[in-house]
Image (cartoon, helix red, strand yellow):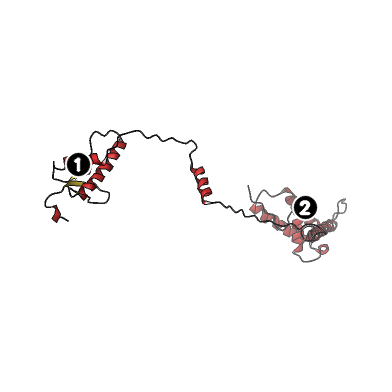
Amino acid sequence: MPLVLDLEGYEGPLDVLLALARTQKVDLAKISILKLADQYLAFITEARKLSLEIAADYLVMAAWLAYLKSRLLLPEPEADDELSGPELAASLAWRLQRLESMREAAGELMQRDRLGRDVFSRGMPEGVRSIRHPTWECSMFELLDAYATISRPAAPQVLRAGRFDPYTIRDAMERMGRLLGVSGNWERIEAFLPGDMTSSLSMRSAMASTFAASLELTKQGRLRLRQDQPFGPIFVRAQGPTDSTES
């Protein structure tokens, strides 16, 4: 959509003529119609440079003013039923005076005090603007309950844990005790896990029990542990006779 601006109250060609007549700073009854016509024709020329789709009534007014200018400059014909040039100029000046009076009356009317805005009748309520700021108060339990209600899934899921035989720490200590004397080298702790574990849950149980058993055997002086880096693999081997001097 094109941008349309309403500047200085221009509503038509007559309003433009009135604005141009005011620039002469004389009484509307004494304005120069020739100068006014030249100003309007210059206005139309500049307007057509900006937009070729200018309103038809502006062009009609420009043509009429050009005709009026010719009637004022040329001598009047002897037999002519139309109004003379001075009569046409006086009619235009009268129309501009009437438009000026209407605009002044409208301006004075709009400047008057308005009921309910500038003046108030007796007993008329002025209206009180209420500003509301909602305040929410709740306890910690209510806050947690609301959060749980939002984060809770729509359909609750039932967790069913399968039954399995856990690998106890005693079993891990007995297995490590049997395997420690086989090799005196460093071995990863995973080498001491039983090989018959089928489920991941059983493997986790065996790993936890084997690690706890290795800590207990190290406490008893039967085992040594080594880990070269954080979160790296854990190595174990049996305690030797010369290990007391190692760092």
- The image quadrant that residue 117 belongs to is bottom right
**Residue 37 makes an appearance in the image:** yes
- Identify which residue, 75 or 190, lies in the foreground: 190
**Residue 234 makes an appearance in the image:** no
**N-terminal-most mark, 1 or 2:** 2
Label 1 neighbour load within 10 Å: few <14, some 14-19, many 20+: many
Residue 206 percent across, percent down from the top left: 27, 39
Mark 1 falls on what kind of element? helix
Mark 2 falls on what kind of element? helix
Q: Which residue is mark 1?
A: 176
In the rendered view, would you say 8 is above or below 218? below
Q: Which residue is mark 2?
A: 64
Question: What amino acid is at disc 2?
Answer: Trp
- Identify which residue, 152 or 140, lies in the foreground: 140
Asked whether, in this view, residue 100 is left or right of residue 194, the answer is right
Residue 83 percent across, percent down from the top left: 86, 53
**Residue at the limit of the structure toward the bottom, as seen here:** 25
Residue 216 percent across, percent down from the top left: 23, 47
Which is more foreground, mark 1 or mark 2? 1
- Identify which residue, 154 or 244, lies in the foreground: 244
Asked whether, in this view, residue 90 is left or right of residue 174, the answer is right
Label 2 neighbour load within 10 Å: few <14, some 14-19, many 20+: few
Whole-Å distance between the Cαs marked 1 and 2? 118 Å
